[in-house]
Image (tube, helix red, strand yellow):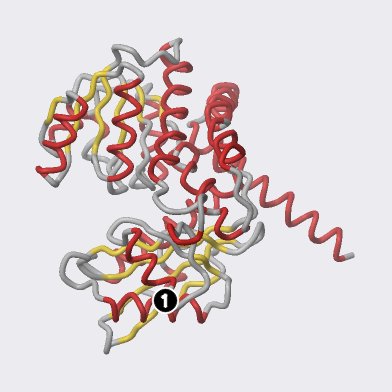
Amino acid sequence: MTVFDSPDYADHERVVFCRDSGAGLKAIVALHDTTLGPAAGGCRMWPYASTEQALSDVLRLSEAMTDKNALAGLALGGGTAVIIGDPATDKSPALLRAFARQVQGLAGAYYTAEDIGIGLADVERIAADTDYVFGLASKGAGSSDPSPFTARGGLHGIRAAAKHKLGSDDLAGLRVAVQGVGNVGRQLCRLLQEAGAKLVICDIDERAAAAAAKEFNAEIVGTDEIYDQAVEIFAPCAMGGVINDATIDRLRARIVAGLANNQLAAPRHGAMLFERGILYAPDFVVNAGGMHNASCDIFGDYDKQRVIDKIDRIYDLTLEIFRRADEAGRPPHEVAIDMAKRIIRDAKERREEQAR
């Protein structure tokens, strides 16, 4: 199967397969669309079962980054990288340096950052061998851990969904199931607790789950049991693809609004949620807070209050998407994607007019 034959190929501009056998590097970099600016998105390291699985992930993630950056109003395109391997056993300084050289070879077409399996310390190591990295603690106030900013935007998205579906954005007393309490999920739990929500959590790391349960007075359930919880809101904050044929019928939540990327295993699953009357807040809308903050490394101008103001507008943007979806009788994620495509199409038309 070629890249063009992949069901997840969506007119990507460039897909680069990277190999350095001496360093143990097998990676794929996908640039989906650079109409608005250079492609930007994280680097994920994961023990994919096959190259096809890795390709599917990087194609879908990069396309989602195009939509995220467009709707966030950033002059950035969509791109993502994946490294095939177990970060617990296969990651090494040599591998990170080899990956950095591959990014440098793209000459600014793609900026990379942290993601699952690639932490902030790893990004610092990558930055030693490439100029095209963002989200660095060493670069200034706008950098470092994006999770508090991602969580802030996520809370606004959840509040907007509650307002639209439940009639109020007051989260006090609402039960929220948070799937995954890593950096972002834990930050979201903190904000939800402060807002008065009652938390049900799970994580594949039992120690992380236990620590979060103690800190936030949360109930722990099994990683498979999380879908069956009687909650108002289900917030996926770990891996993508968790909204699928096997889980949708199990959901008892009225809202799905979380911070994981690509929560829908396929676009049709958003339609299935819509048919069941479950409101889905598109992940690429509500999890854009980290990009607002970390992208300042690319643009070189950081004003924390300006960043926060942009993140806080996620509330209004999410409500606007729900409003348009209701008017059109369509699933919200489809409306959000159309909005992003319109932004890109308008930018292309302006470019063509200027060229004439």
Q: Is residue 50 left or right of residue 355?
A: left
Where 66 falls versus 112 (above or below)? Answer: above
Image quadrant assignment for residue 267: top left
- Quadrant where the N terminus sits is bottom left
Residue in the foreground of this view, choosing between 324 and 271: 324
The percent position of residue 316, horizontal first and vertical second, equals: 58, 26
Q: List the residue tagged with mark 1.
A: 100
The percent position of residue 242, horizontal first and vertical second, equals: 27, 42
Q: Is residue 304 left or right of residue 274?
A: right
Q: Residue at the spot x=39%, y=50% of the render?
A: 145
Q: Residue at the spot x=53%, y=62% of the render?
A: 32
Image quadrant assignment for residue 211: top left
Where 226 falls versus 302 (above or below)? Answer: above
Q: Is residue 239 left or right of residue 159?
A: left
Residue in the foreground of this view, choosing between 231 and 247: 231
The percent position of residue 101, horizontal first and vertical second, equals: 43, 81
Where 314 falls versus 109 (above or below)? Answer: above
Q: Secondary structure at mark 1?
A: helix
Where 127 falls versus 152 (above or below)? Answer: below
Task: Give the residue type that dot 1 points to.
Answer: Ala
Image quadrant assignment for residue 126: bottom left
Q: Residue at the spot x=55%, y=27% of the render?
A: 325
The percent position of residue 305, horizontal first and vertical second, equals: 58, 37
Q: Give the mark count.
A: 1
- Quadrant where the C terminus sits is bottom right
